[in-house]
Amino acid sequence: MIQAKNVSLRYIDGTVALREINLNVKPGEFVYIVGPSGSGKTSLLKLLMGIEFPSAGSLYVMDQPVLKKETRKIRKLRQNIGPVFQEFRLIQGRTALENVLMGMRFLDIPKRQMIINAKNALVKVGLEHKASVMVEKLSFGEAQRVAIARAVARKPALILADEPTGNLDYDNAINIMNLLYNFRDKNTTVLVTTHATHLIDNYQDASLIRVEKGKIHVERRGAKV
Amino acid sequence: MKNTFYFIKESIRIFRYNKLSNLFSFFGTALILFLLALVVGVWSISSQLAGMLKEEAEISAYFNKDVENAEDLLHIIEQIDGVRYVRLVNEEEARSRMEKILGDESDILDLFEENPFEAYFEVKIHLDKMDPVFTQISGLKGIDYVRENRDVLEQIERISKALEVLGYLVIAAVSITTLVIISHMIRQGIYQNHEQIKTLMLLGAPDNFINFPYVLLGFLLTFGGGIVATVFINILIHQGYSMLTGTIPFIPVPPKSQLVYGLSTFLLSVSAALGILGSLFGVSTSKKKK
């Protein structure tokens, strides 16, 4: 699913975010990426989404090389990824249902199926009763769950969740973690970044990768579903 | 097809983001297109007028009294290349024509004891062959004097050409102005929605999907402006024709239905094309982060 070989990421201002990382994530794996703030977790997810590009080394996501010149292919690659952004990135002025649908409108999914997927995803995140509520009227936790519903409704091969529990209280954070954990599937690989290591103790069969100062090392290799 | 309603709703939403500015763009475009229709209408009428007058291009060839058989000379003139039609106008008809021209003043002709008018050939010609025809008829044996109305025809031709040039200039000016207005409006819409666009890009939406509501809005605004301009130009044509036929009925204007149909088709086609081009230009020149 993901193969990174000696990948480095240096930003335009000279900051080195990742240093010669090697990573191999298999299909169906559930991976927690932990590390303190500013360690490079978000940079790693940005690379995997093709928002940033390796300064050195080679990176493949779903057999697609992540290269700057491959703009069109990167956009296509993103269609197979379910992203959950740290800042949610919900589209304002739309309902929760419309936001979930927005992630599927340009995919090859029939309209009826698209609506079924969206409603099912909202049921899974426990927000079916908020389907017609404008997203700006939702609470922080609810907005986070809509973002998760948008990511999973299109049944992606890879879910990338960046700090999905940031700014949430403990109970809500555990709920979100459980939610993501329950989306693991033999066809769906899930990568979740978090700096709250105490939240992941309960998920012993998940892989655990630690990022520190741009370097990564695999602490635990979990079982595939 | 599954996104038809979504695209329409998005276009309306983008319109609402900057309602006042978009409304001004809409009415501005309608006004510009209306002015374009006015110029093109006048150009069309003047071209038709020039064309009709060209058909009337003629020279008058006067022959001397030694000519025994004017019919023989008429047949010779008929054979000249560039001559469309020749007719012999005898002395009586020449006098009668002058009486018509003079109207109430025609009594003055009674002062002459004899008919002062001479018979002549009325020769309808192709305007572009005026010079060779004039030279050939002048050189015929028995022809005394040849008169042509070239000055008037050339004047009309010049006015018609000037209007044609003006028409092209106005079309160019209108096209550029409309393209700038629409593309600017689209860029403004994209700028105001850049966060949404960025999110869609991150979700993997292709450019066509992202751009379509903007192109649709640009098209609808310009085409809507075209419809408004068409309605007003039709009202103006109806008013104008009723005034013309009442006061100066001899002006050879084209049939009303022909002018209405021609201008309406022109305006709607131009507005549709400019709408699409302006929107595409706006979308392609807006800076979007990939």
Image: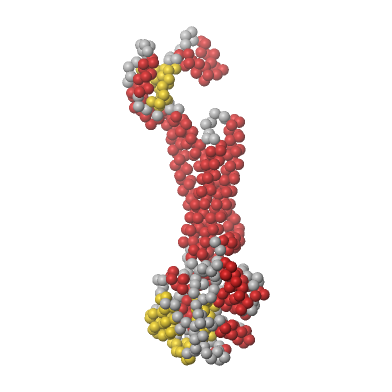
Residue A75 seen in the figure: yes
Q: Position of residue A143 (x, y in %)?
A: 61, 76
- At 51% from the left edge and 64% from the top edge, which residue is drawn? B209
Where B161 falls versus A69 (above or below)? above
Q: Give the image quarter of residue B6.
A: bottom right
| Quadrant of res A129 | bottom right
Left or right? Give the position of B138 relative to A124.
left
Q: Is residue B113 above or below residue A37?
A: above
Q: Which residue lies furthest to the right in this view?
A: A129
Q: Choose between A103 and B28: the one closer to the eye.
A: A103
Given residues A32 and B53, the one toward you in this image is A32
Q: Position of residue B44 (x, y in %)?
A: 49, 39
**Is residue B156 rendered to the left or right of residue B226?**
left
Q: Against B14, is B153 above or below? A: above
Which image quadrant: the N terminus of chain B? bottom right
- The residue depicted at 53 percent of the width and 46 percent of the height is B267
Identify the residue at image location x=46%, y=33%: B51
Give the residue at x 37% y 19%: B75
